Image: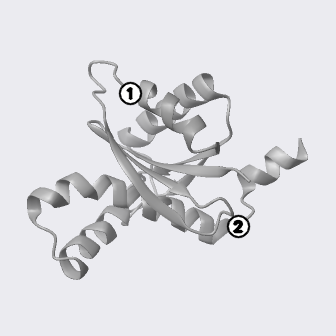
Amino acid sequence: MTRLMGLDVGSKTIGVAISDPLGWTAQSLEIIPIDEEAGNFGMSRLKKLVPAQDVAGFVLGLPKNMNNSAGPRVAKTKAFAARLEKKFGLPIDFQDERLTTVSAYRVLIDDADVSRRKQKQAIDKLAAQFILQNYLDAHGPLTALQKEDNNG
């Protein structure tokens, strides 16, 4: 069985998470440094990760505003999704990511007592894990992406 990759796309980093082969749980994987202004979107690193992790599709965090409106980051995330689709030809879905960063900070501060320096290094990766886990919880172990793949 193949896996889903969760991505928390920012302007400077992409947090990466991966599902287990059965699609029950998400684990944080790594942070990919990017530079939107310079046109570096981390595709070379993703090109290595996708086959190595047997990725069947992507789940991207959709950074909506608290009032459910779409701000400039939503447009940039959708543009990134278009790049992913062109590069890999795999299904892509979106998961509302409101409050995932807040949840990640709470885990790092309250539960793990992680230093502020290390928080910045881990926050995007953990947010990607929360995005993917929320998606898996909402769609079950056989996700909408995998259903599309199996049905043609």
Q: Position of residue 1 (x, y in %)?
A: 74, 54
User: Residue 144, percent across and down?
Assistant: 74, 56
Residue 136 drawn above or below residue 87: below
Lateral position of residue 79 relative to residue 152, left or right: left
Residue type marked 1: Phe
- Residue at the spot of label 2: 141
- Mark 1, other Cα within 10 Å: few <14 / some 14–19 / many ≥20: many
In the current view of this chain or complex, which residue is farthest to the bottom?
A: 111
Q: CA distance from mark 1 to mark 2?
A: 29 Å
Q: Is residue 21 above or below residue 72?
A: below
Circle 1 is placed at which residue position? 41
Quadrant where the image shows the C terminus: top right
User: With respect to residue 37, does 129 lie above or below?
Assistant: below
Q: Looking at the image, which residue is at 36% across and 66% down?
A: 99
Q: Is residue 73 left or right of residue 142?
A: left
Q: Position of residue 68 (x, y in %)?
A: 46, 58
Residue in the picture at 61% in, 71% down: 137
Say which label, 1 or 2, has the lower sequence index: 1
